[in-house]
Image: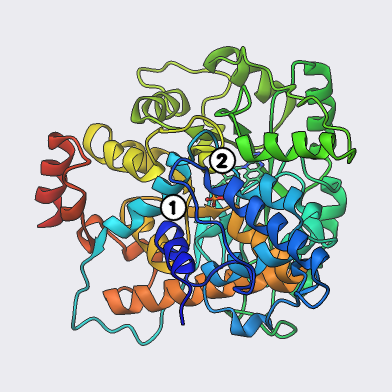
Amino acid sequence: MANPRAAQWRNHTGITRPVLDSTVVLTSRPAWTDHSTYLVQQREQCIAAADNDPSSPRPSLEKAPPLHQLLSIADLQESALRVLSPKAISYYASASDDEITKHANSRIFQSILLRPRVFRDCTSCSLSTTIVGNKVGIPLFVSPAASARLAHRDGETGIARACARFGALQVISHNASMRPADIVNSVNTRTSMSDAASPYGHESNLPPVSFAWQLYVLKDLATSERILAEIKKLPQIKFIVLTLDAPFPGKREADERHKARDLRTGGAQAQPQVWGTEAGLTWHKTLSWLVRHTDLPIVLKGLQSWEDVYLAASLAEPQQGQQYPFSGRLRGVILSNHGGRALDTTTTPVHVLLDIHRFCPEVLSKLDILIDGGIQRGTDIVKALALGAKAVGIGRAALYGLAVGGEDGVARALEILAEETTTAMKLLGVTSPDELRPHHVSLCSLSSQLTRAVFIHFCSRGRQ
Ligand SMILES: Cc1cc2nc3c(=O)[nH]c(=O)nc-3n(C[C@H](O)[C@H](O)[C@H](O)COP(=O)(O)O)c2cc1C
């Protein structure tokens, strides 16, 4: 008989099966407990039960099912939570405060409905597009995430090689667990051009893999300048992503609890959180500094309001002959709330995208608008593109794939999303990402969440 507590678990998380073996009694999740803490507690409870009863399965020794049996990102996540250490779960899955933003990021996609068209020839369908001028085989990039080796020894090189198999772009984190040179050189550009060697190859003639590098400007500017000089030597890195939404650490309680427990049990010393990111960044000062230290295009990550996107676009293409040192170099923005890890209860990137349509639609043709946060399905990708995003990023989905199968696990995550996106596009009646338009989505079930002005604006555009 189904475990009623497991059913409750399903209701809370949308995950289709209980994360841990049902022979272990699951503590029902108090409404106030944050999700990541709950995951860690469940896993530790399970390990403790296994220690007391040798016949009980120990999750860390459980084998994940073969990759081809994992059919969705949720399946990958569930398997990853079986194999990751409690420390890794608390770091990867955690988000700030009550994790409202983290969950809202995903939920908003479920509230947007699709509007298929018929009598469109969709016999062939291509996912190719460009991101900041770089050809990609799929409108998807792997967002920067620190410490990939916590998931699997392949680390960031596993992500890089998986991306090469799909022509996807990887944004390497400032806090990557491997050197940028080792990551970009782990990919043989020639093999990434063809799908011949790859069981997961998605399209033939894939573009060569491209990388971007994510920068946190440090308090010690000289160190940032030295790192930028190193990045300059890597031609595979095509643009710099400057993260702006985390000048201070968000309050990630699952992570803090884990560190405190480690300390109590005499485990690894809890380090005081090193947060060297400069909090005094400003538009003109920081961008002028940055263009002095890199020749690459710049993308700003962590924008959470249409006003900031408007400002970025105005500085990128100033009117009336005005020119800034960084004009022309600012090429895109990533609407992102750091996967809910910075400020909790902020708007989602999708809300910002909708505001852009209402208040400054011209920015869509001035900058590449990218988004990340909460992407779980190909339909999420299609909805973001229909609303004007050039491509979407995945953070945790790639880490969970990495945890389950290293490079092959990340490739499986990309394969699932590529196939789901292709299916969604064909069923909508479009054959390339550029054909997706706002009229392919309906925001009816979002009406209570949008300002009246944005909602009316969209309803009228939807009919065009
Ligand atoms: C474990 C983890 C580490 C992260 N590290 C970074 C980082 O070093 N730099 C950064 O700009 N964003 C970082 N992020 C945020 C991601 O780039 C991305 O915005 C977020 O994960 C997207 O949400 P998703 O995980 O729901 O896909 C991190 C996210 C996670 C989950």
Query: Dot 1: what SS?
Result: loop
Q: Which mark is residue 390?
A: 1
**Residue 244 vs residue 6: left or right?**
right
**Residue 455 vs residue 217: left or right?**
left
The quadrant of the picture occupied by the C terminus is bottom left
Task: Tell me if mark 2 has few (under 14), some (14-19) or many (20+) residues whose alpha carbon lies within 10 angstroms of its own.
Answer: many
Which residue: 60% across, 12% down? Answer: 285
Choose the circle earlier in sequence order: 2 or 1.
2
Query: Dot 2: what SS?
Result: loop
Q: Judge by depth and name the residue closer to the eye, 173 or 22.
A: 22
**Residue 133 vs residue 60: left or right?**
left
Location of residue 211 with respect to 305 vertically, above or below: below
The kind of residue tagged 1 is Lys
Which residue: 28% across, 84% down? Answer: 121
The kind of residue tagged 2 is Ala
Ligand 1 falls in quadrant? top right
Which residue: 38% across, 29% down? Answer: 305
Q: Which mark is residue 95?
A: 2
Give x and y (percent) for residue 187: 80, 64
Give x and y (percent) for residue 186: 84, 61
Q: Which mark is residue 96?
A: none
Give x and y (percent) for residue 7: 43, 68
Give x and y (percent) for residue 247: 61, 22
Location of residue 399 with respect to 207 vertically, above or below: above
Task: Tell me if mark 1 has few (under 14), some (14-19) or many (20+) residues whose alpha carbon lies within 10 angstroms of its own.
Answer: many
Q: Judge by depth and name the residue closer to the eye, 32 or 197.
A: 32
